[in-house]
Amino acid sequence: MTNFKLYNANHGISAGDALLRQLTKCLQHYFPNALMAHLSADNFAVLAPRKDWEKKLVAIEKEFQTLLDDHSVTSKAGITLYEKLSAKSRQNPRHSFDTAKIAAGSIKQDASRVYAYYTEDMGRQLLDEAYVLRNFETALQ
């Protein structure tokens, strides 16, 4: 979710917890046979077959917005396709969660998008940004 900390600050932790429970119900409704986990804070993982993901994610966001009186909070989904991961990455499930989070983060400021698929370019961009930040001070000297 975007701006969830702000939602908690404005509405209280108990309201934020209730919102998380409602989001969980939405996920369970649209992905009834999927393996799900609440990873941390406002991060969830859903392992599901690739049937109608996009439609379901858009429907979840619409339903989510009906629960809110604060439209600065939105749901964003990052999708990692297992078959596009390297063999090494497939051995570590945490990598799938990390790449999905990167994909969701890539659209955090884009109000027109509910989901994004992880691409290798996203990973390269993060590495490039980290390199610049690590070497910024050296470049100034």
Image: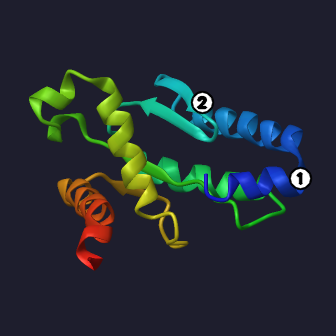
State the SS at label 1.
helix
Above or below, 25 against 60 in this view is above
Which mark is drawn over residue 138? Answer: none
Q: Is residue 93 left or right of residue 35?
A: left
Q: The residue under label 1 is which amino acid type?
A: His
Q: Which residue is mark 1?
A: 11
Above or below, 41 against 32 in this view is below
Above or below, 3 against 83 in this view is below
One can see residue 52 in this view: no
Point out residue 34 in the picture as x, y percentages from the top left corner: 46, 25
Name the residue located 61 percent from the left edge and 33 percent from the top edge: 29
Of 70 and 35, the residue lying toward us: 70
* Separation of residues labelled 1 and 2 (CA atoms): 25 Å
One can see residue 73 in this view: yes
Q: Which residue is mark 2?
A: 28
Name the residue located 17 percent from the left edge and 37 percent from the top edge: 85
Name the residue located 53 percent from the left edge and 25 percent from the top edge: 37
Report the residue that reaches farthest toward the left: 87
Point out residue 129 in the picture as x, y percentages from the top left corner: 29, 64
Q: Is residue 7 left or right of residue 42?
A: right
Q: The residue under label 2 is which amino acid type?
A: Gln
Residue 128: which quarter of the image?
Answer: bottom left
Q: Residues within 10 Å of mark 1 (few under 14, many from 20)?
A: few
